Image (tube, rainbow, N blue to C red):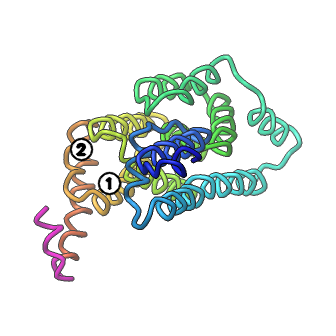
Amino acid sequence: VEHYLRTQETETLASHISKYLHDYFTRYRPTPKRETISKLNSFQGRLSQKSISCLIHFIYEQIGSQRRESIRTMVAFCSQTNATPETLRAQIKGYFDSSEKFSAGLLQLADADLNVTLMTALIRKVDCFDDVEHLFWETRRLLDERYRADWAAINLFALIYREQGVLSDANRKVILAILEDLRGQVAIEQANILAFLVALLSSLVSLKHVFAADTITKTLITIFETLYTRYHTEYLILLDEVGIPEDDRKVISSRIAVKQMKEINDAKYSRCIG
């Protein structure tokens, strides 16, 4: 700043500000420097206006999100139907304690970009309800600290598993938050987003062998309807990549077709054409 005041070199000041913004952002989630610069330049006005707008946007988008996650954790804990001392003790233990099975992998995710392979490997380690209960509460603690789409996906898998495949409002909100996060992170390449969604959807399809098939089908329908609303006809790629069972494909395709017909009736032609 002192150098800028002497020389009026705007580039030096911009580099200084973007560095400290980047340092601040990475305290909450891994952020490539190019993403910070891109975010900073996306705002209008002078450098001071852009940097303040960028910081405020991050606070509302990231830090505000973490506060909401913390509240959601408390609500989940207080809303348990089984409130026996043993159950509550196990949940608190799952929230605060580490596990040999999951903790190392979850912490490894913390220091990397979106890691689909490791995320999938952690989900595949789940063998029973005890695993799911611990994984759910441990990922809740991590999400309370900062948001990551892969932690949220693992938490969603555990949430649907522990609720025996039922699509609750909590499941729906997590799905929407994950998709919104993926859409908002400009640094994530499209191929990585596709691989992430394939891994998440494949893990949910695998639950058809654990619970009643129709409950998981309803979950898949909701996800694909959301994907269609947000990404339009690109959802078709996922139907092929995930290997959705034929019966489910027909149901999903029918539901999307109904949405498309409604859009035609509402004169929203452009999205239907794709």
Q: Is residue 210 magenta?
A: no
| Residue 159 to residue 232: above or below | above
Coordinates of residue 189 in the picture (x, y in percent): 30, 39
Disc 1 element: helix
Question: Quick one: which residue is furthest to the right in this view?
Answer: 85
* Mark seen at residue 224: 1
Q: CA distance from mark 1 to mark 2?
A: 9 Å
For the residue marked with disc 2, what is the amino acid?
Leu
Residue drawn at point x = 63 percent, y = 19 percent: 101
* Category of crowding for the residue at label 1, using alpha-carbon neighbours closer than 10 angstroms: few (below 14), some (14–19), many (at least 20): many
* First reached walking from the N terminus: tag 1 or tag 2: 1
Question: Quick one: which residue is furthest to the front in this view?
Answer: 6
Residues under numbered marks 1 and 2 in contact, where contact means CB atoms less than 8 Å apart: yes
Disc 2 element: helix
Question: Quick one: which residue is furthest to the top in this view?
Answer: 100
Please state which of residues 149 and 225 is positioned toward the viewer in this rendering: 149
Residue drawn at point x = 63 percent, y = 58 percent: 64
Please state which of residues 43 and 225 is positioned toward the viewer in this rendering: 43
Please provide the residue range marked out in magenta: 264-274
* Mark seen at residue 239: 2
Determine the image quadrant of residue 213: top left
For the residue marked with disc 1, what is the amino acid?
Phe
Please state which of residues 136 and 127 is positioned toward the viewer in this rendering: 136
Residue drawn at point x = 18 percent, y = 77 percent: 268
